[in-house]
């Protein structure tokens, strides 16, 4: 099976939002990268071909730097000096989680005729620096390219994965949370999430043996979407986009894992797509079918 990908290598982003949920600070959420790809798709559809679709998106993180200062054993978020008010008085200092990072983005493309390959790459080269990524400024990137592979040919699949090195691709591991919920017969997934993330710094005096198997790998909490708390409403004051209905929502958090691209056996393990569950009012990104 032939599949076609658009790869934008080595995007350097400055001053991006590092707080993807009220209790998560780190690499920006996958939803922000999906939003970036969606906006890029709209521009390509409007200027090149209406049939082009980005059906899946993946990221490979090459470097990440949280903007913080270290004070003793602890790190504090750095604050910025914002412009003065019109009155000449200084603005309030607001502690924000900001980061700088370098990432490659890979989009699976459908509806792209070979004759439009050069037009697509040229359009991206000319317009991409005007984009925001996770509210951060895009400083530079290497030349995008189109890459087609036959999934039945191992060498071609590995060749694609090598183009995402040196970096770590983000995969979804909500299967671990489901497994833990079933083991403990839990309804609260947050406890299962914390089982894989929490670190104890004091020895248990009772020395109770833990039968819970610690999974190997670089496991992290990630924001993957939103849970609607209300029904869609119109005419909400201060709404950013009045032509769309407004829904109050909260973040959906699950477990993710960073892996070296060359350790991936199935490329769909790190390619994210949109999903919607109307009965639960969930709108989220997932790598699962």
Image (spheres, rainbow, N blue to C red):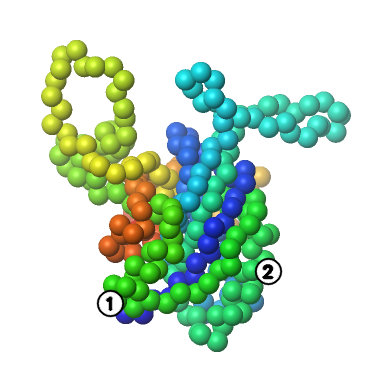
Tag 2 or tag 1, which sits nearer the N-term?
Answer: 2
Task: Give the labeled residue for mark 2.
Answer: 126
- Residue 122, given in percent of the width and then of the height, sits at 63, 74
Q: Position of residue 242 (x, y in %)?
A: 64, 55
Q: Which residue is mark 1?
A: 152
Q: Foreground residue, 275 or 111? A: 111
**Image position of 46 with respect to 64: above or below:** below
Q: Residue at x 86, y 29 (%)?
A: 87
Disc on res. 240: none
Depth order, front residue of 278/199: 199
Q: Is residue 83 above or below residue 57?
A: above
- Mark 2 surroundings: few (<14), some (14-19) or many (≥20) residues within 10 A: few
Asked whether the viewer can see residue 72, the reply is yes
Looking at the figure, which quarter contains the C terminus?
A: bottom left
Identify the residue at horizontal 53%, vertical 72% (top origin): 145
Q: Are marks 1 and 2 in contact (CB under 8 Å)?
A: no
- Figure check: 179 above or below 130: above
Q: Locate the N terminus by quadrant.
A: bottom left
**Residue 158: image x %, image y %?**
34, 67
Q: Secondary structure at mark 2?
A: helix
* Residue depicted at 29% across the width and 48% down the height: 174
Position of 81 relative to 2 (above/below): above
SS state under label 1: loop
């Amino acid at each position: 099976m032939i599949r076609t990908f658009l790869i934008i290598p080595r995007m350097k982003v400055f001053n991006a939002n590092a707080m993807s949920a009220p209790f998560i600070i780190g690499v920006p959420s996958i939803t922000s990268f999906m939003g970036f790809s969606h906006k890029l798709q709209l521009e390509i559809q409007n200027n090149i071909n209406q049939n082009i679709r980005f059906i899946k998106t993946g990221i490979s993180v090459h470097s990440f730097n949280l903007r913080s200062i270290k004070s003793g054993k602890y790190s504090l978020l750095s604050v910025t000096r914002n412009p003065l008010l019109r009155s000449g008085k200084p603005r309030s200092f607001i502690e924000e989680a900001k980061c700088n990072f370098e990432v490659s983005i890979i989009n699976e493309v459908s509806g792209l005729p070979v004759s439009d390959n050069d037009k697509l790459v040229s359009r991206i080269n000319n317009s991409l620096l005007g984009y925001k990524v996770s509210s951060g400024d895009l400083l530079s990137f290497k030349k995008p390219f189109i890459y087609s592979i036959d999934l039945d040919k191992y060498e071609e699949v590995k060749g694609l994965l090598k183009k995402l090195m040196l970096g770590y691709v983000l995969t979804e591991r909500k299967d671990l949370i489901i497994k833990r919920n079933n083991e403990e017969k839990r309804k609260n997934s947050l406890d299962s999430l914390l089982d894989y993330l929490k670190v104890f710094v004091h020895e248990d005096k009772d020395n109770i043996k833990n039968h819970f198997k610690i999974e190997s790998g670089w496991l992290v909490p990630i924001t993957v979407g939103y849970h609607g708390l209300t029904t869609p409403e119109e005419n909400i004051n201060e709404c950013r986009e009045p032509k769309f209905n407004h829904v109050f929502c909260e973040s959906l958090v699950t477990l993710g894992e960073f892996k070296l691209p060359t350790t991936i056996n199935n490329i769909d393990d790190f390619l994210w797509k949109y999903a919607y569950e109307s009965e639960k009012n969930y709108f989220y990104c997932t790598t699962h079918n």
